[in-house]
Amino acid sequence: MPEIPLRAIGLAWYRPDDWPALRKLFADGDKLPATHEKWLQQAEAVEQRLKGSGIIVERVYIDPDGFARWCAARGMDIDADARKRFASEAVARKYRNQS
């Protein structure tokens, strides 16, 4: 029987205490919900939809200082594309040797 490839994705995740600093840090922060609670409702809905499709979802927490350094080291803007790449790379590292 052929193996089914592991499907896992990373979702950028934010701690409530970091939310104000992250919204200021992100180039597109004004496009995010004003409150962490509103963001969390939306993020959990996305997470559940993906899990319902059989995808493994990993929450990848973003720290304001560490993420800013990560973006600077790669010459990336601090925006949605960088958040997606950060989360994707974290999950890729985790699952790299589990196929």
Image (spheres, rainbow, N blue to C red):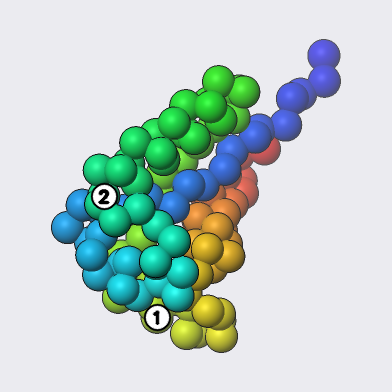
75 with respect to 14 (left or right): right
Q: From this viewpoint, is residue 86 visible?
A: no
- The numbered mark, 2 or 1, whose residue comes first in the sequence reads 2
Q: Are marks 2 and 1 in contact (CB under 8 Å)?
A: no
According to the picture, the residue beneath numbered tag 2 turns out to be 36
Mark 2 neighbour density, 10 Å: few (under 14) some (14–19) many (20 or more):
some
Disc 2 versus disc 1: nearer the observer? 2
- SS class of the residue under badge 2? helix
Q: Farthest left residue? A: 17
In the rendered image, residue 67, in percent from the top left (x then y), is placed at 39, 71
44 with respect to 93 (left or right): left
Q: Is residue 2 above or below residue 88?
A: above
57 with respect to 24 (left or right): right
The disc placed on residue 22 is none
In the rendered image, residue 25, in percent from the top left (x then y), is placed at 35, 75
Q: Farthest right residue? A: 2
Residue drawn at point x = 47 percent, y = 85 percent? 72
According to the picture, the residue beneath numbered tag 1 turns out to be 69
Q: Is residue 94 above or below residue 17?
A: above
Residue drawn at point x = 62 percent, y = 23 percent? 53
Residue drawn at point x = 25 percent, y = 43 percent? 37
Label 2 is placed on what type of residue? His
Frontmost residue, 87 versus 3:
87
Mark 1 neighbour density, 10 Å: few (under 14) some (14–19) many (20 or more):
few
Q: Farthest top residue? A: 1
In the rendered image, residue 60, in percent from the top left (x then y), is placed at 41, 51
Label 1 is placed on what type of residue? Arg
Frontmost residue, 58 versus 53:
53
In the rendered image, residue 7, in percent from the top left (x then y), is placed at 65, 34
Q: From this viewpoint, is residue 8 visible?
A: yes
Marks 2 and 1, how far apart in space?
23 Å
Point out the image quarter for the N terminus: top right
